[in-house]
């Protein structure tokens, strides 16, 4: 028997022991998941020592306590982030976040801040982003320790509390503690997400006066496809018309139905009287996802087609205000994309209120780290996977050499950032097994 075949046999034995462990302890795992999902860790009013509010700090405290129970060296970075280290000179970092986006008061069929198992699916805010994967990482460590899987190299888990608001947590963390040389986050897709498109977030406004419409309210956050757009008409009765859509993450607009562009498509008024709405209808045709009508529509071989979505539209103080989410290919730059959009908006009579974004992030597919994670994926999933590109900005977007490893599969729609966010039990168990085997492989 060759050394290679011995290694394969050892890997197969470890994989089976790990899988059996998770099956035996699954009820306990769900209990932990219920604990962290019960905490509303969306951003709230900062307080002394709690830069992102009470909920975020409470979630980080929960994570820190779990790390201590695992015997890891825990360090709290002033409630910006928490790190938990095994061994010395860690070679692997696993970066996840315990904050979540807010849960709307309407539309949920399950309690948003609870872990509800219905059939073969787990429901609740954070199930896929990122509380479910974070619990999977913690239990991956627990399994390796209790099964006495030998590890000769160190690793570090980092939980942050501000991913959804802009990642100030990691900016603060990196000033005090360096990342290990290899970093993955369970904040994207399997097999390995090594290519992340660039992003532009832009808000704009213009004076607005319409003899028929007194109020427009569409969308709530810039990075989500709006599922509601409410129009209030003038008159003594103040009639309201609600345009309904389907929510989705703004990086995947094709998974949703945009209620704002649905309204604009139905808008029939004379463009001479209400030029702003007619201009938006022209620039953002309902059902168009790549921004071609804005002068965009770019794509490349590695990252594929770009996306562009009008995600916010409202009236306030005599002005019409809007927001746009754009994810662009790696062969383009933030300056180029923002310049095109700003020029088009200004020529249509809009003023630019704010524009920010990120350049693309790319780690070559042939890097040893990417190839090792692909090997783990193949062994656990039973099929070979290829690196993928997405428009979503993962937690490692600004981390050199970092990639996303899970937590969902590209063909899944887990209602991330939407109502009834969920993860299937099958995918959650895949998370558990992927992360335990990845740590075992990289740190043996």
Image (cartoon, rainbow, N blue to C red):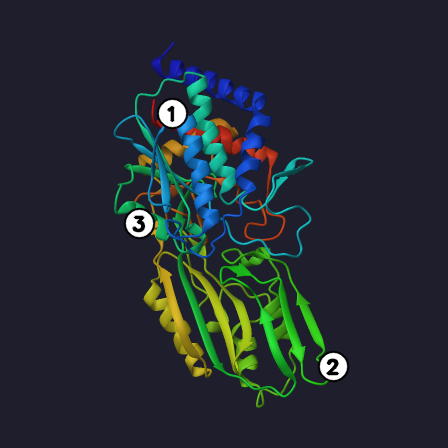
Res. 187 visible in picture: no
From what the image shows, is residue 68 above or below residue 243?
Answer: above
- Tag 3, which secondary structure? helix
The image shows residue 16 at horizontal and vertical percentages of: 51, 19
Q: How far apart are marks 1 and 2 (CA)?
A: 65 Å
Question: Considering depth in this image, is 386 or 209 the residue closer to the camera?
Answer: 209
The image shows residue 387 at horizontal and vertical percentages of: 42, 42
Residue on which disc 2 sits: 237
From what the image shows, is residue 298 above or below residue 381?
Answer: below
Q: Distance between the residues labelled 3 and 1?
A: 25 Å
Q: Which mark is residue 151?
A: none
Residue on which disc 1 sits: 71
Residue on which disc 3 sits: 172
- Tag 2, which secondary structure? loop
Q: How far apart are marks 2 and 3 (CA)?
A: 52 Å
Res. 225 visible in picture: yes
Image quarter (top left, top right, bottom left or bottom right) of the C terminus: top left
Counting every numbered tag in the picture gives 3
Give whichever of discs 1 and 2 has the lower sequence position: 1
């Amino acid at each position: 028997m060759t050394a290679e075949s011995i290694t394969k046999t050892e890997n197969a034995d470890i994989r089976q022991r790990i899988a059996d462990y998770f099956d035996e302890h699954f009820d306990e795992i769900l209990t932990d998941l219920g604990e962290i999902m019960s905490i509303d860790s969306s951003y709230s009013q900062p307080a002394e020592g709690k830069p992102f509010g009470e909920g975020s700090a409470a979630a980080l405290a929960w994570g820190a306590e779990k790390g201590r129970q695992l015997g890891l060296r825990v360090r709290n970075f002033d409630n910006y982030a928490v790190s938990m280290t095994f061994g010395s000179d860690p070679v692997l970092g696993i970066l996840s976040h315990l904050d979540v986006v807010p849960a709307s008061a309407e539309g949920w069929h399950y309690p948003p801040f609870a872990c509800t198992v219905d059939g073969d699916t787990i429901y609740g805010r954070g199930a896929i982003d990122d509380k479910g994967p974070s619990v999977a990482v913690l239990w991956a460590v627990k399994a390796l320790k209790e099964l006495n899987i030998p590890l000769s190299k160190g690793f570090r888990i980092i939980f942050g509390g501000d991913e959804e608001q802009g990642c100030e947590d990691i900016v603060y963390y990196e000033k005090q503690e360096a990342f290990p040389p290899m970093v993955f986050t369970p904040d994207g897709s399997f097999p390995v997400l090594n290519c992340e498109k660039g992003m532009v977030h832009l808000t704009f406004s213009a004076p607005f006066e319409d003899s028929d419409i007194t109020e427009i309210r569409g969308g709530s956050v810039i990075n989500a496809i709006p599922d509601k757009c409410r129009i209030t008409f003038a008159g003594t009765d103040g009639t309201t018309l609600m345009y309904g859509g389907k929510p989705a993450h703004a990086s995947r607009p094709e998974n949703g139905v945009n209620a704002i562009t649905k309204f604009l498509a139905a808008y029939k008024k004379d463009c001479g009287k209400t030029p702003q709405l007619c201009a938006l209808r022209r620039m953002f045709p309902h059902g168009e996802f790549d921004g071609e009508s804005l002068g965009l529509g770019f794509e490349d071989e590695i990252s594929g087609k770009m996306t562009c979505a009008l995600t916010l539209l409202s009236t306030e103080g005599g002005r019409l205000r809007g927001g746009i989410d754009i994810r662009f290919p790696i062969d383009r730059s933030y300056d180029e994309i923002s310049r095109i959009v700003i020029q088009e908006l200004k020529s249509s009579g809009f003023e630019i209120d704010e524009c920010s974004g990120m350049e693309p992030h790319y780690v070559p597919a042939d890097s040893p780290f990417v190839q090792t994670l692909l090997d783990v994926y193949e062994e656990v999933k039973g099929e070979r996977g290829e690196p993928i590109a997405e428009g979503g900005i993962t937690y490692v977007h600004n981390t050199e050499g970092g990639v996303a490893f899970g937590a969902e599969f590209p063909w899944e729609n887990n209602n991330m950032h939407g109502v009834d966010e969920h993860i299937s039990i099958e995918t959650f168990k895949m998370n558990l097994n992927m992360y335990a085997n990845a740590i075992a492989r990289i740190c043996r």
